Image (cartoon, rainbow, N blue to C red):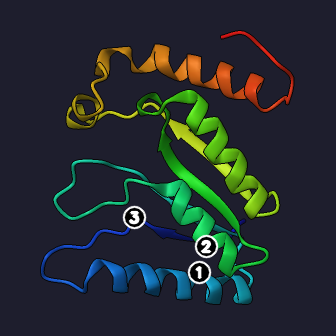
Amino acid sequence: MELTITYDMRAPAFGAPRNALFQAALDQVAWADELGFDVVGLGEHHCSDDGYNPSPLPLACAMAARTRQIKLRTSVLLAPLYDLVKLAEDAAITQIISNGRLLLGIGAGYRPCEFESFNRRLQDRWQAMGEACEFLRQAWTGEPFAW
């Protein structure tokens, strides 16, 4: 069994300011790391009125800088919405900063507004997921490859 703390970073208008929520999350995950939590989960959504976290990898990097043991899990990163080269690079840097603690959970997504805002087609998401998996596996070998 694993002990997990999860953040979606929603910041409705009636609540605390976003910067205060992010600072609190960083403090909390440092506390969770000291207590022996196993994993912090970070979601991703776009076009949300309440500010759902659109950028899990930068948040994972900030959390990695404040912790030493807790694993950082994207749950889930919406792979079909990313430029694959940039995703591979950002995930690799997060893995370096976290000293190997990134658990990259990727998903296909399901919200039409997210795909529209990235000029992607929702009906292409499963093909895009397959391509993302294939690309990331090749990119992280460190060997040159054609794409």
- Residue position marked by numbered label 2 in the rendering: 63
Q: Secondary structure at mark 1?
A: helix
Amino acid of disc 3: Asp
Q: Position of residue 145 (x, y in %)?
A: 78, 14
Left or right: where does residue 4 sit relative to residue 33?
left
Which residue is painted at 59% across and 81% down in the image?
Answer: 29
Query: Can you tell which mark lies on residue 29?
Result: 1
Q: Secondary structure at mark 3?
A: loop
Look at the image and tell me whether residue 3 can be seen.
Answer: no
Tell me the quarter of the image containing the C terminus.
top right
- Mark 1: give few (<14), some (14-19) or many (20+) Cα within 10 Å: many
- 84 w.r.t. 22: above or below: above
Amino acid of disc 1: Val
Q: Are marks 1 and 3 in contact (CB under 8 Å)?
A: no
Which residue is painted at 74% across and 82% down in the image?
Answer: 36
Which quadrant holds residue 123?
top left
Q: Position of residue 69 (x, y in %)?
A: 79, 74
